[in-house]
Image: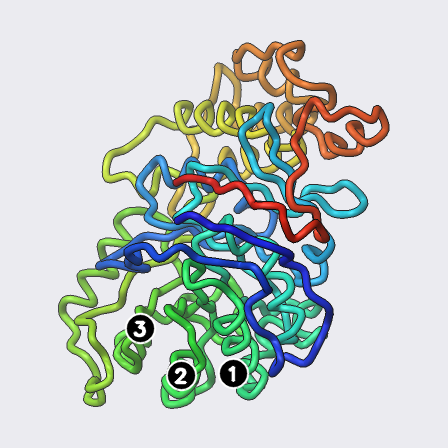
Amino acid sequence: VILVEGPWAFPMQNSDDLQCPTGVVDVPVEPTPLYTRRVEVLAPMVRASSLPLRLECLRYGADFVFGEEIIDRRILGASREENAAFGTVDFVSRDKAVVFSTCAEERRRVFFQVGTGDAALAAQAASVVCHDVRGVDVNMGCPKSFSVKSGAGAALLSKPEVVADILKTLRRTLPASCAVTCKIRMLPTTVQTRDFLQLCERSGAEAVTVHLRQKRERPADAAHWDEMMRLWDAVRIPVVANGDFFNRRQIETFWEMCGSTGASDDCSSSRHSEPAGVMVARGALWNPSIFCREAVPFEERLLKYLRTAIEVNNPCQNTKWTMSSMIAGGTGVCSPPEFRSVKTTVFNQRLNSSKSIAAVCELFGEPYHAASYPAKSHTVSFYQDAQENGSDAKVQKRDAVTHDVTQKRPRIDP
């Protein structure tokens, strides 16, 4: 996809008046299928679904990956920075924090998930990143109070008119190359959930992921896989199942269940013969190689993740947290009792006590040459340091929120 663009930030206005920003042109290309049969997708997870985990999951076989939910206002005003030192594209807030980071390797397979309760804000937020991602997904399932109180997340399940406005506005505003999808939870009844899926389809969603729990249910409650058999055929667009996929065997069991269960009586609206795929959350955090059909040794998974985190300038705090989660494991994902000649719990404590990425590498026996990287690499202050020193050596600024209409946005090839 070759994209040429003029100004892509536009003033707040009524969502009914929103149109594709002036100057944005999609050069016609053959469209890529969004979801084919039995896709496997990395879920959006707070803190976890950062760039290195997404890349590792893709390398192990995931078809698509989702970034963590970003609240609409948080991405507004961000500048787009091409980080030449690490080959990433970083969206940096006015206070010099990286809000979202991506790269060419995931370009056609990454979704940006936005948390929003307002169509105009959603469109503005999505327009910041739409040319660097495969699609924009609207979070309609988060039950946390901070999300629900703002009218976003699971609050949207009871606001069909707002949902329709958001999805229609996004589809009308974004280029055809950027898919519009959403992730929901089950409603109290099957009929209500089917109706909601049909609302999403009518409003322009190209796929819907259903978290197979209701708003009141928590991760400790079992996901209702059986309910998916009564939902996926409500619409013609792909429907993806999410919930309790912690290992390969569970994924296989789900598909066996689909094979032994026919569609519901009202399946005339569906073009599919089964759900389109599965979305994996905690199972992929604990073991990114869940997408691989072959077992990958525990230490190999950790070292690959660490190298990727260094490769893309991931902040040390996030790298440590993710690796600690991988080491601790969880339901259906067991860690070895010992790792590198000490108890795994002791090793994890040492990891959490590490003060820098160099210390983390030393713990794992990995080389790290600080002199090879710009100052403040692998820290949250990377861009703050560049601002203070007035240095442009690290990044090439492209497409700040306001720029001259004659500028052309460089493309990121897949």
Which residue does the image show at 80% across and 33% down from the upper left?
384
Would you name the residue on which mark 3 appears? 237
Which residue does the image show at 51% across and 51% down from the upper left?
4
Query: In the image, what residue type sits under mark 1?
Result: Ala
Which residue does the image show at 73% across and 72% down from the upper left?
12
Would you name the residue on which mark 2 appears? 202
Give the mark nearest the N terminus, 1 or 2: 1
Q: In the image shown, does 141 or 137 lie closer to the viewer?
A: 137
**CA distance for labels 3 and 2:** 10 Å
Give the mark nearest the N terminus, 3 or 2: 2
Quadrant location of residue 355?
top right
Q: How many marks?
A: 3
The image shows residue 251, relative to residue 359, as above or below, that is: below
**CA distance for labels 1 and 3:** 16 Å
Residue 196 image offset from top left, x and y in percent: 43, 84
Would you name the residue on which mark 1 appears? 164
